Image (tube, coloured by chain):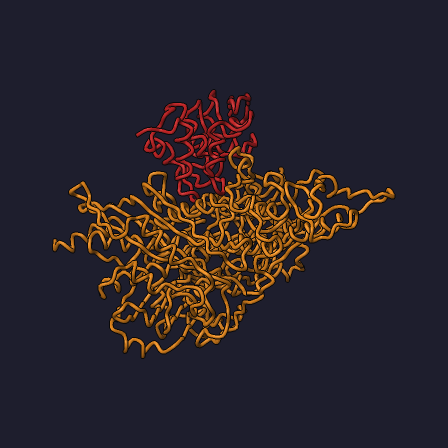
């Protein structure tokens, strides 16, 4: 960490009491959302010229396209244009360019886009899409990641070694391994030989869907001045602009010609990061100049042709000493990454770097393999690989503790990683409140106190699990902000992070308001437009409170310096004697002086000779971590500093299980997360409650099911159940730990994704605690529990 | 086909196709955009509106079925500022992304009309048809209970 980034504000302000940061300020997007005023992409009117697109999709998981006949579709009523891969032979991708806008010679998953139809109405587009005739030579799909890495397996991407990718990926040519993240630290073999106890087992995690309630939707327009504007429901306006400009560069676009506008987005969870279906809309618009084109995915498409959370087979081996000290971890993660891994390969990478979990481990062998399969493309989902591998890891830790006769909480306390411990890739762990999180979580569920059910048909179980996660992003991911004052002393801030629901806009207002002594309700922060708003990499990785927050804090500090400079010019007070309070400039050396911001932040201050000083106060700020680097040894993972910091925490539950039916009720759930500093504690609690419920659903019932031909069987909310208002714990106890992040804005670090990670293993551990049954595959459904009880009783 | 309908207190006469849903007509013909398109099969509840005070999934109602009836969307209860329930939603952070919020506000409004003092179970039941992926429902339930004199079980 660079000293200049350390506690920017406090270093300058002498730690005065905070007035905005740390308070439960009312959300600045609240009235919009509660009154129906909030506008999402699909709510914007584009007038009678609006065209509608529909997508022709592959019915096969793997096939060669023999021919495409669009003639019937082109003649259909209302059709304006039909496009296929021939119109756009361009690759695109976030971290690895392995996708095409429309399939070229091969289709690689059921639902892949083969052609697009643009028509005057949505119905006409859908009708005409059915008239496109595609002849396929059907091939045998590879659906199992472990089969796909066997010798002689069919190659899903034979040209893999020619693909462009980021330098920290290591594809293996002539295999289906698109990236292999290795960590080699210490001597694992020796450590296992010298361990007093070694446990080895395999855990499996299926695919999951994000299920944001707003489906992906995009409207694109190429105007007659060759300006491409794209309105998207997205987490990533600047990254989308960059990928559109790169992919469509052969058509003559440069970045300044492409504009991405992102109004409110109806949930993301990673599913609206990067670029998925939006490229289809952007490309089609280039064929119908002057007309906006809307592409709105159906709920079914949302399930099978946006990103899915990747499945994983995790082979885990952990060695400990008899006193409970973990000496070695060997974690092999076989990821079912799907047909295209342009984004998902980085999930694999992130998991590989951190697959020891939040423990101090001297000897590590991690292998995280990104494996092509003929299932839909994997990608980012809240937790980004960590939700997946924590299931096995934290189940395993409970089993080891039991085997060596140690309390699972004590075992975790003994091994929990703390500040200064060495990470898997050699760098030092950041400050962390892990031990406090463990203790407060354990206390919240009365850990150590056995509870008996009043109902003879049910049993009570308790569980605990830890979690950690670092933002997974390129080492130079950055954020920027602009800030300007208005005549009345109110402020407009422009940033390009996205308000996904987490409360980002409000938090940015709180940070600026704290520095400038302006109340949050006098600060407007709105969703981005890449023409107007400064750069932000993406709103992912739980990094925007930290990174964009620092950019806003720096802009506010710059504005404050300009304000003091005006006062100095006119009144002669030294800058370091000035401070801001209640929207006024005040002076430590002259208590009688007070000048309201509204008196001069636009018009300046008149001097004795009648001339003016100052003028509009405008400022900018940017943040890029300058201590990270992704240049590690491909064979050992050592030598780099890929992650900025980790956020840690603990989850605990008390559940009740019906011994006959296997039904599980979560009676109480506690979750402690180290937010560094909660800029807005109510919003942190919102993340805890929402993330925990989302995580519990992945372990209790959600599950993507595919048939033997690779077709998704449950692409709707009838067959893929997500929680309703009934499906929540009886009680949720949110616990905020605050061990400051030295380089965070006011000490803050991100918490959004983390709250989902501990949910799966904590249920597995509590089910074991209740029944003595260890379930090693997700989800832990009522059916699985009931069958396990039957098996246990010998029936 | 002719459709005579009252939307948020305003009378409309519209020529609609037999296959048009109430949701299509509200969004595309009348410009009332708070009912959202989330699943188009009645699973998610983001298109919830009130017909004569009763909540329905407007994606499953044909526009012609609403002939002669009175439709209320969240715009209709926001003309005179936020309702007591909406204010409680604001204070309790009973929303995150806001996409499901109009539907949830309407389902909760209907519940409180019919049962001014609901229990936690009553609230869960009334909202069970409105999916929210962000909040974990807890802050929504809290706000509705607070609107109904705190609830009792």
Q: Quadrant of residue A111?
A: bottom left
Going by the image, does A457 lie left or right of A382? left
Residue at figure coordinates x 18%, y 47% from the top left: A659
Query: Residue A276, can we see it?
Result: no
Above or below B112: residue A69:
below
Towards the viewer: B147 or A775: B147
* Quadrant in which the N terminus of chain A appears: bottom right
Q: Residue B139 location, x and y as percent?
A: 42, 38
Q: Is residue A18 at least partly visible in the picture?
A: yes
Q: Is residue A144 above or below residue A13?
A: below
The correct choice, above or below, for A330 with respect to A301 in the image is below
Q: Which residue of the protein is positioned furthest toward the right in this rendering?
A: A609
> Chain A takes which shade in the image?
orange
Residue at 64%, 61% (x, y): give it.
A249
- Which is more toward the observer, B62 or A704? A704
The residue at 44%/33% (across/down) is: B48
Quarter location, residue B148? top left
Question: Which chain is red in the rendering?
Answer: B
Image coordinates of residue A433 in percent, x first then y, are: 42, 57
Percent x, y for residue B38? Answer: 46, 41
Q: How many numbered marks appear?
A: 0
Q: Position of residue B133 (x, y in %)?
A: 42, 44
In this view, the residue in front, A161 or B4, is: A161
Q: Quadrant of residue A348?
A: bottom left
Which one is nearer the viewer's eye here, A682 or B104?
A: A682
């Amino acid at each position: 960490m660079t000293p200049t980034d350390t506690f920017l504000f406090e270093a300058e302000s002498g730690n005065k009491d905070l007035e905005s940061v740390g308070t439960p300020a009312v959300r600045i997007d609240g009235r919009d959302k509660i009154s129906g005023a909030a506008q999402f992409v699909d709510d914007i009117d584009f007038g009678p010229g609006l065209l509608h697109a529909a997508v022709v999709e592959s019915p096969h998981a793997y096939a060669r396209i023999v021919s495409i006949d669009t003639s019937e579709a082109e003649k259909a009523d209302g059709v304006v244009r039909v496009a296929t891969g021939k119109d756009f032979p361009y690759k695109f991708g976030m971290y690895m360019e392995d996708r095409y806008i429309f399939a070229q010679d091969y289709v690689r998953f059921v639902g892949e886009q083969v052609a697009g139809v643009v028509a005057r109405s949505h119905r006409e587009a859908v009708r005409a899409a059915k008239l496109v005739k595609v002849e396929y030579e059907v091939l045998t799909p590879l659906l199992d990641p472990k089969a796909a890495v066997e010798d002689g397996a069919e190659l899903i991407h034979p040209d893999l070694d020619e693909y462009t990718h980021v330098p920290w990926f290591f594809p293996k040519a002539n295999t289906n391994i698109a990236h292999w993240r290795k960590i080699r630290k210490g001597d694992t073999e020796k450590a296992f030989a010298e361990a007093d106890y070694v446990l080895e087992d395999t855990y499996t995690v299926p695919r999951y869907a994000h299920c944001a309630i707003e489906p992906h939707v995009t409207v694109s327009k190429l105007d007659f001045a060759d300006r491409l504007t794209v309105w998207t429901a997205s987490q990533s306006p600047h990254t989308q602009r960059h990928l559109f400009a790169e992919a469509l560069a052969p058509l003559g676009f440069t970045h300044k010609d492409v504009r991405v506008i992102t109004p409110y987005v109806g949930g993301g969870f990673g599913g609206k990061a990067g670029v998925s279906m939006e490229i289809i809309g952007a490309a089609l618009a280039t064929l119908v100049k002057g007309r906006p084109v809307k592409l709105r995915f159906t709920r079914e498409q949302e399930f099978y042709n946006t990103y899915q959370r990747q499945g994983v087979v995790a082979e885990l081996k952990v060695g400990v000493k008899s006193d409970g000290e973990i000496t070695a971890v060997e974690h092999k993660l076989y990821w079912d990454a799907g047909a295209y891994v342009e984004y998902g390969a980085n999930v694999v990478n992130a998991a590989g770097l951190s697959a020891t979990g939040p423990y101090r481990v001297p000897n590590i062998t991690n292998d995280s393999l990104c494996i092509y399969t003929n299932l839909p493309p994997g990608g980012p989902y809240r937790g980004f690989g960590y939700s997946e591998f924590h299931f096995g890891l934290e189940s395993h830790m409970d089993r080891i503790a039991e085997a060596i006769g140690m309390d699972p909480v004590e075992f975790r306390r003994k091994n929990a990683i703390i500040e200064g411990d060495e990470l898997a890739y050699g760098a030092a762990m950041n400050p962390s409140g892990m031990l406090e999180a463990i203790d407060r979580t354990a206390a919240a569920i009365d850990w150590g106190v056995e509870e008996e059910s009043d109902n003879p048909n049910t049993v009570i179980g308790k569980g605990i699990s830890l979690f950690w996660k670092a933002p997974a992003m390129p080492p130079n991911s950055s954020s920027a902000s602009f800030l300007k004052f208005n005549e009345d002393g109110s402020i407009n801030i422009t940033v390009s992070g996205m308000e996904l629901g987490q409360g980002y806009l409000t938090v940015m207002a709180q940070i600026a308001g704290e520095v400038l002594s302006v109340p949050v309700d006098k600060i407007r922060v709105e969703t981005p437009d890449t023409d107007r708003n400064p750069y932000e990499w993406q709103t992912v990785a739980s990094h925007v409170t930290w990174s964009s927050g620092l950019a806003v804090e720096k802009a506010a500090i710059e504005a404050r310096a300009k304000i003091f400079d005006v006062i100095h010019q006119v009144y002669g007070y030294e800058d370091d004697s000035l401070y801001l309070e209640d929207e006024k400039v005040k002076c430590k050396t002259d208590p009688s002086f007070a000048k309201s911001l509204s008196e001069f932040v636009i018009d300046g201050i008149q001097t004795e000779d009648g001339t003016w000083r100052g003028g509009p106060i405008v400022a900018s700020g940017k943040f890029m971590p300058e201590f990270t680097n992704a240049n590690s040894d491909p064979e050992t993972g050592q030598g780099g500093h890929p992650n900025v910091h980790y956020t840690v925490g603990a989850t605990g539950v008390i559940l009740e299980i019906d011994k006959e039916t296997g039904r599980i009720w979560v009676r109480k759930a506690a979750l402690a997360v180290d937010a560094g500093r909660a800029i807005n504690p109510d919003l942190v609690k919102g993340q805890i409650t929402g993330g925990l419920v989302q995580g519990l659903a992945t372990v209790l019932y959600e599950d993507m099911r595919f048939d033997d031909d690779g077709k998704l069987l449950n692409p709707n909310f009838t067959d893929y159940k997500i929680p309703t208002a009934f499906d929540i714990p009886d009680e949720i106890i949110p616990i905020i730990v605050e061990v400051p992040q030295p380089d965070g804005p006011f000490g803050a670090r991100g918490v959004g994704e983390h709250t989902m990670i501990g949910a799966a293993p904590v249920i597995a551990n509590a089910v074991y605690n209740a029944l003595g049954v260890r379930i090693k595959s997700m989800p832990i459904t009522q059916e699985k529990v009931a069958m396990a009880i039957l098996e246990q009783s010998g029936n | 086909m002719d459709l005579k309908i009252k939307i948020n207190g305003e009378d409309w006469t519209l020529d609609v196709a037999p296959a048009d849903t109430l949701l299509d007509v509200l969004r595309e013909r009348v410009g009332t955009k708070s009912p959202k398109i989330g699943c188009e099969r009645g699973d998610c509840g983001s298109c919830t509106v009130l017909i004569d005070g009763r909540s329905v999934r407007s994606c499953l109602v044909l526009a012609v079925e609403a002939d002669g009836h009175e439709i209320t969307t969240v715009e209709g209860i926001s003309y005179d500022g936020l309702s007591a329930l909406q204010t409680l939603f604001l204070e309790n952070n009973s929303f995150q992304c806001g996409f499901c919020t109009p539907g949830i506000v309407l389902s909760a409004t209907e519940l409180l009309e019919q049962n001014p003092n609901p229990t936690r179970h009553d609230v869960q039941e009334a909202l069970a048809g409105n999916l929210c992926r962000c909040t974990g429902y807890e802050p929504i339930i809290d706000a509705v209970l607070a609107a109904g004199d705190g609830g009792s079980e």
